Amino acid sequence: MARHLGEEAAPPLSLGLSHGCPRVPWWPSEVREGVVKPALAGTPNRKLYLVGGSFGLREFAQIRYDVHKLRGKVDPALKEKLKQNTVTLESEYEKLEKSDLDNWENIRGPGLLEDSRTVQKQRREALRLKTE
């Protein structure tokens, strides 16, 4: 390719660091100067934050994977206890059929500013007077 008069030669491609900023030809100069350079250059606290943050993220990700591995494992004692459990859906349904759900009494709980013990004492006293 022939160069015309007044035309400058294109700079050579280099991906190495030059003055703290990588030379990536497809990045606009505003990005190189405004994003990459300030992230690489700066106070030691910022560099420590960047490096420490990457190690911290690695540790949290490792915890995630460790929990995922342990989720499939079950304690043998718990497995035996679950095998001994004879409660079935049908047995629970039979218990509900036997219970009397039509005769019930609405019991009001204590309010926000009421003491639950005094309310319980009043209810017990009222129930005792009612049965006498």
Image (cartoon, rainbow, N blue to C red):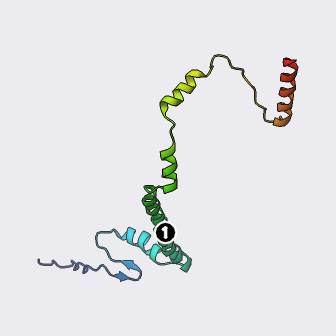
Q: Is 69 rendered above or below residue 40?
A: above
Q: Where's the C terminus, which quadrant?
A: top right
7 left or right of 97? left
- The residue wearing badge 1 is 59
The percent coordinates of residue 82 (x first, y second) are: 50, 46
Q: Where's the N terminus, which quadrant?
A: bottom left
Do we see residue 115 in this rendering? no
Out of 102 and 88, give the one closest to the viewer.
Answer: 88
119 left or right of 40? right
Instruction: Provide the secondary structure element on which disc 1 rests.
Output: helix
Of all residues, the one furthest to the left in this rendering is: 1
Q: Residue at x 87, y 26 (%)?
A: 125
Q: Residue at x 56, y 77 (%)?
A: 45
- Tell me the amino acid under the disc marked 1: Glu
Q: Residue at x 81, y 36 (%)?
A: 116
The percent coordinates of residue 10 (x first, y second) are: 23, 78
The percent coordinates of residue 74 (x first, y second) are: 47, 55
Label 1: few (<14), some or many (≥20) within 10 Å?
few
Q: Is 69 rendered above or below residue 39?
A: above
Q: Residue at x 48, y 64 (%)?
A: 63
